[in-house]
Amino acid sequence: MRRILSVAVILSVLWFVPLAAQDDGPNVYLVRYITVLDAKYLTYFQEALIPVWDEFVRSGKLVSYDIAVQVSGSGDVTHIAVEEYADWDAADGLLGAYEEASQAVHGRSWAEVTEGYYPLDEIRKIRTDIYWSIKP
């Protein structure tokens, strides 16, 4: 009986330890290097995109985001936008979420909100790199 009890305790501890030590994985960062070609893109960014990203943060779909504007230096990149996601699934899962977030913050479809800004390649150049955090 004592042996069965010992085995049960050991198995319960062995089951719990991996769960306690389990990591959700590294956070994923999408870094967008943007060159604004037309002021219309800044309007798109401020009025359409940022409110949707704010909604993503409020709803937990996005951990955080930040936008930096170049104030000195060389090169053609004018802005850097960094989106932080909890994991790969969260980063990959936002494609259909723009519609829902647009309805929540703008009261209109994403297509209606962004009408007049497309094709975006005419008003900005963009390069996107993906990074993940290195957790000790």
Image: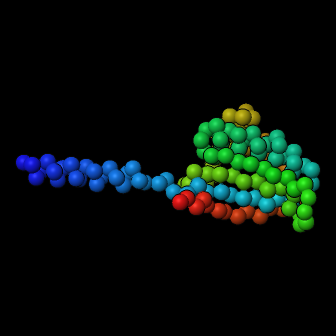
Percent from the top left, x then y, of residue 85?
Answer: 61, 51
Displayed quadrant of residue 71:
bottom right
Point 71% across, 44% down: residue: 53
Residue 87 left/right relative to 125: left
Instruction: Looking at the picture, tell me which residue is in the foreground, 8 or 30.
Output: 8
Percent from the top left, x then y, of residue 126?
Answer: 80, 61
Instruction: Looking at the picture, tell me which residue is in the foreground, 62 or 103.
Output: 62
Q: Residue furthest bottom?
A: 75
Number of on-image labels = 0
Q: Residue furthest left?
A: 1
Percent from the top left, x then y, of residue 77?
Answer: 86, 62
Q: Quick check: can you spot residue 53?
A: yes
Percent from the top left, x then y, of residue 18?
Answer: 36, 55
Residue 97 left/right relative to 16: right
Point 83% across, 55% down: residue: 79
Instruction: Looking at the picture, tell me which residue is in the foreground, 70 or 101.
Output: 70
- 106 up-or-down from 81: above or below: above
Point 58% across, 61% down: residue: 134
Residue 125 left/right relative to 59: right
- 19 up-or-down from 48: above or below: below
- 100 up-or-down from 21: above or below: above
Instruction: Looking at the picture, tell me which residue is in the foreground, 2 or 118.
Output: 2
Point 72% across, 59% down: residue: 31
Q: Quick check: can you spot residue 93?
A: no
Colour pattern: rainbow
